[in-house]
Image (tube, grey):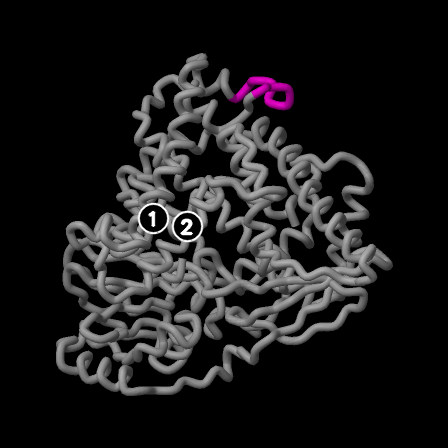
Amino acid sequence: MAATNYCSSPVLHRLNEISCFGCPASSTARISIAKKKGYSFRCQSSTNTDESKTTKTTNLLDNASNLLTNFLSGGKIGSMPTAEGAVSDLFSRPLFFSLYDWFLEHGSVYKLAFGPKAFVVVSDPIVARHVLRENAFSYDKGVLADILEPIMGKGLIPADLETWKLRRRVIAPGFHALYLEAMAKVFTDCSERTMLKFEKLLEEECSRGGRTIELDLEAEFSSLALDIIGLGVFNYDFGSVTKESPVIKAVYGTLFEAEHRSTFYIPYWKIPLATWLVPRQRKFQSDLKVINDCLDGLIKNAKETREETDVEKLQQRDYLNLKDASLLRFLVDMRGADADDRQLRDDLMTMLIAGHETTAAVLTWAIFLLAQHPSKMKKAQAEIDSVLGQGRTTFESIKKLVYLRLIVVEALRLYPQPPLLIRRSLRSDRLPGGYNGDKNGYEIPPSTDIFISVYNLHRSPYFWDKPNEFEPERFLVQKESQGIEGWAGFDPSRSPGALYPNEVIDLLL
């Protein structure tokens, strides 16, 4: 979704020599793998999208937008500086690049005026921690909840803080050690299914005299993640790696609609009858029905075979040999976790939509970065060969892959998922000045929309050495933080994908 995600991830294909050209976030990048000498990677960019060199042009629409901004946006919110956004900033390049440029120009807390609407953009860990943790009950998820609630209901992402706490308290015990060990086999089997598909495509190309294949790895990893979540959460095999189903089409349809709503000025979909008169809104309702029918059927089947018991006994089941080791089975069988079908549907929908998108994005960016740094890829491969060898991959063995873990963490630093968090103030508040802001802080009124730029936090020159460079080894060096962290780990209501430990991404990578 454009409000919380990157506008385009790299498209990757493989080749028989290792070379690399710069491919930042908004490019169409390609990575290749060849038949000879195993798999090697090459990355190239189809467009010049250097983040630091992207030029901005203005047009008549931009000028009109700026005039409207000056006329309608009112006075300053507190004493914070103001950045004026143009319409082209929404469409000419990912918004995060513009937010980063304004961060370097105006500081860690500034007001961003877009047309008649103003936002507060936060790029400071102290201020972010105040909004997300220390004073969390003074904020809700604002426009993000408006966009996602029709899809996810009261699932973990759009839910208010109280509902989020309640549902996470119920769901989190399902991610216990024996479940994760069983899931390691699911992850491995699904990954092997994906690699077999790649190898088959390469064999077919070789039979036609070709030497390389081109793959959209973001799409491939999305299919992989959907299959994993289907089996791990629902005990249902989407089979999306090898075929396209109506459910998978519907999942992507809902994602496209969420992206559309996050970037459109006027929420026309709230107009009475728009749901039925506007073709894309009719399709959206149709997509939702397909997904809901699928989830409702899975919930119904699980409840018909319910075996209610205590959490402790559930966590001691023989998950490696269970016919159904899914999270849905755990939630349905857990005594005291009574939730109506609607709440279960909302929880599962959130994990299906957000969980697969997050997993696919992290994998894509990790491969993208490794393709640009072949020496680091070789180092990671050497660690894998040394630690895992030819034996069966287990959840415990993955924990020994220290360098691979650093690669995933560094990929998340450079391309955080999500790159932007959205909040809206429920009452007046005073934001702290932050690391280098106004020591008196900033007064904000009720209904102030706030963008917390995780992208800016993770690339802040105030907290990171060489912030735009891919250096996994940076996390091996202990630094004095003085209680200030440049890493966005302070949001209690993170994506449901965060319920899976980081070793899951390590295993897939």
Element carrying mark 2: helix
Whether residue 472 is situated above or below residue 327 in the rendered picture:
below
Q: Which mark is residue 465?
A: none
* Residue 376 appears in the figure: no
Q: What amino acid is at disc 1?
A: Phe
Q: Which residue in the structure is indicated by mark 2?
A: 253
Secondary structure mainly formed by the magenta segment: loop
Query: How far from the left and from the top, in percent, is residue 310?
Result: 43, 16
Q: Does residue 104 appear to the left or right of 325 in the view shown?
A: left
Which element is circle 1 on?
Answer: helix
Can residue 68 be found in the magenta stretch? no
The tag on residue 284 is 1
Tell me whether circle 2 and circle 1 mark residues in contact (CB < 8 Å).
yes
Q: Badge 1 local density, few (<14 within 10 Å), some, or many (20+)? A: many
The residue depicted at 30 percent of the width and 79 percent of the height is 86
Q: Which residues are magenta?
A: 315-323
